[in-house]
Amino acid sequence: MTDTAAPASSGPPAAPAETVSFGYTNVTPEEKTARVGAVFRNVAARYDLMNDAMSGGMHRLWKDRFVRRVKPRAGESILDMAGGTGDIAFRMAARGAGVTVSDINGAMLEVGMERAAKRGIDGLVWSEQNAEALTFGDAGFDAYTIAFGIRNVTHIDRALAEAHRVLKRGGRFFCLEFSTTQWPGFAEIYDAYSHRVVPKLGKLLASDEESYRYLVESIRRFPTMPRFQAMIAEAGFVRTQVEPLLGGLVAIHSGWKI
């Protein structure tokens, strides 16, 4: 009599692979990181053009308001994350703060350093960093800022946890980001403009329709203002607040580390 071996067990089914949003498409975290990197390498040299297209030219006013909310002071050490081109850092440095400008994208940092040199702005520290895994030590900064960058982070919760870690006790977190306006009528107008016009402007002015399409789609996939405020609290911040601009088209989020 011949024994028949039992079939080998295949084991439990494999867990589904993690996916994250890249615009309206779900991709692996590694693919998102790579794709976002490509987008910002493509738009780095045309950063102001990109922001003008996305905001109708209003991003400069929003950034001025943002920095007024941060209230940078002489002698403070501030980390400006995803700030490669220097827009926020230049404003804060003008108020006497010591600013470290960090970005995951070297091409963006190169643009910022060139702009700083042309404007005669020195004293800034430039550092290529991943927001999800900063190389800075604990409790080293008085403030952490990020403008129009957190929606492009692969794991937002990890970036928020890192922001909390590198802040001193009493440190403050400020984020400027696109959201979804609640104003009746205007929401529909901006939605049509962003989906139909912005990518075409990217094609016309920068020969890059797809990067601009992703940037529009990434806004639609970003958490709502209440949800993102809750995420900031979940990272350990207290006294979290959100200040909607243009009914929520853009929002300034903030929190404190105690």
Image (cartoon, rainbow, N blue to C red):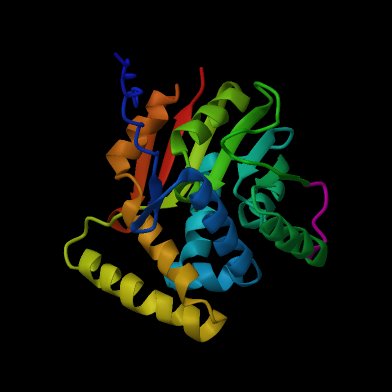
Q: Which residues are magenta?
A: 119-124
Query: Percent from the top left, x then y, of residue 126?
Result: 76, 47
Quarter of the figure that contains the N terminus: top left
Q: Is residue 244 left or right of residue 257?
A: left
Query: Compared to 8, does 24 lie above or below?
Result: below
Residue at x-position 32% and y-position 77%: 196
Q: In the image, is residue 123 part of the stretch drawn in magenta?
A: yes
Q: In the image, is residue 198 part of the stretch drawn in magenta?
A: no
Q: Can residue 249 be seen from the camera position used here?
A: no
Query: Compared to 164, does 245 lie above or below?
Result: below
Q: Is residue 257 left or right of residue 227?
A: right
Question: Where is residue 39, by image quadrant?
Answer: bottom right
Q: How many marks?
A: 0
Foreground pick, 115 / 40: 40
Residue at x-position 67% and y-position 42%: 129
Question: Where is residue 188, by image quadrant?
Answer: bottom left
Query: Percent from the top left, x then y, of residue 65?
Result: 49, 52
Foreground pick, 180 / 159: 159
Q: Can residue 59 be seen from the camera position used here?
A: yes
Residue at x-position 67% and y-position 45%: 102
Query: Percent from the top left, x then y, of residue 140?
Result: 69, 25
Q: Is residue 143 left or right of residue 235?
A: right
Question: Where is residue 114, by image quadrant?
Answer: bottom right
Q: Tell which residue pokes out farthest to the bottom in this image.
A: 204
Assign the magenta stretch its main secondary structure: loop
Query: Compared to 60, does 103 lie above or below?
Result: above
Foreground pick, 64 / 192: 192
